Image: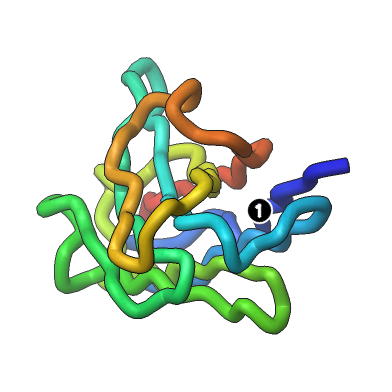
Amino acid sequence: QVQLVESGGGLVQPGGALRLSCATSGFTFTNYAMSWVRQAPGKGHEWVSGLTAGGVRTAYADSVKGRFTISRDNAKNTLYLQMNSLKSEDTAVYYCAAKVSGSWYFIPTTHEPQSYDYWGQGTQVTVSS
């Protein structure tokens, strides 16, 4: 049974930080490139960040570049997102997503859930004073 379980969300003040985790099981984590995708209230999905199956290459949306850092621990089958200097516009449900990787340099950059092989249930991040 495939599972992607996000955690680490919560309420934080503007300028604060959070670290999201996505614990996975039921599939070969090292064969999958991973992404974080978010959905703000009343809006569509937005791709946030992604990295290769080996974790060597990363990519970020312009809206989070310089503030967020994506990483993975393949020994623990876990994906992370370190979020610093949070802004109110970062308020959203954050999902982790997995897409099978056919190459070492592949990073999924789509926001569409149907483009991924696996998708988590999401964790709420609220940035407010």
User: Which one is nearer the viewer's eye here, 62 or 14?
Assistant: 62
Q: Quadrant of the C terminus?
A: bottom left
Residue at 38%, 25% in the rendered image: 112
Q: Is residue 53 left or right of residue 79?
A: left
Q: Tag count in the figure? A: 1
Does residue 92 appear in this view? yes
* Quadrant position of residue 51: bottom left
User: Which one is nearer the viewer's eye here, 31 or 18?
Assistant: 31
Kind of residue at disc 1: Glu
Residue 16 percent location from the top left of the image? 36, 71
Residue at 66%, 53% in the rendered image: 6
Furthest-left residue in view?
Answer: 62
Residue 26 percent location from the top left of the image? 82, 52
Q: Is residue 80 above or below residue 108?
A: below
Residue 29 percent location from the top left of the image? 65, 62
Q: Is residue 102 left or right of residue 87?
A: right
Residue at 11%, 53% in the rendered image: 62
Does residue 15 appear in this view? no
Furthest-right residue in view?
Answer: 1
Q: Is residue 14 left or right of residue 21?
A: left
User: Which one is nearer the viewer's eye here, 56 or 38?
Assistant: 56
Q: Is residue 107 above or below residue 68?
A: above
Q: Residues within 10 Å of mark 1 (few under 14, many from 20)?
A: many
Residue at 31%, 49% in the rendered image: 48
Which color mode does the image show? rainbow
Q: SS at mark 1?
A: strand
Furthest-top residue in view?
Answer: 42
Residue 1 percent location from the top left of the image? 88, 42
What residue did someone put label 1 on? Answer: 6
* Quadrant position of residue 81: bottom left
* Quadrant position of residue 120: top right
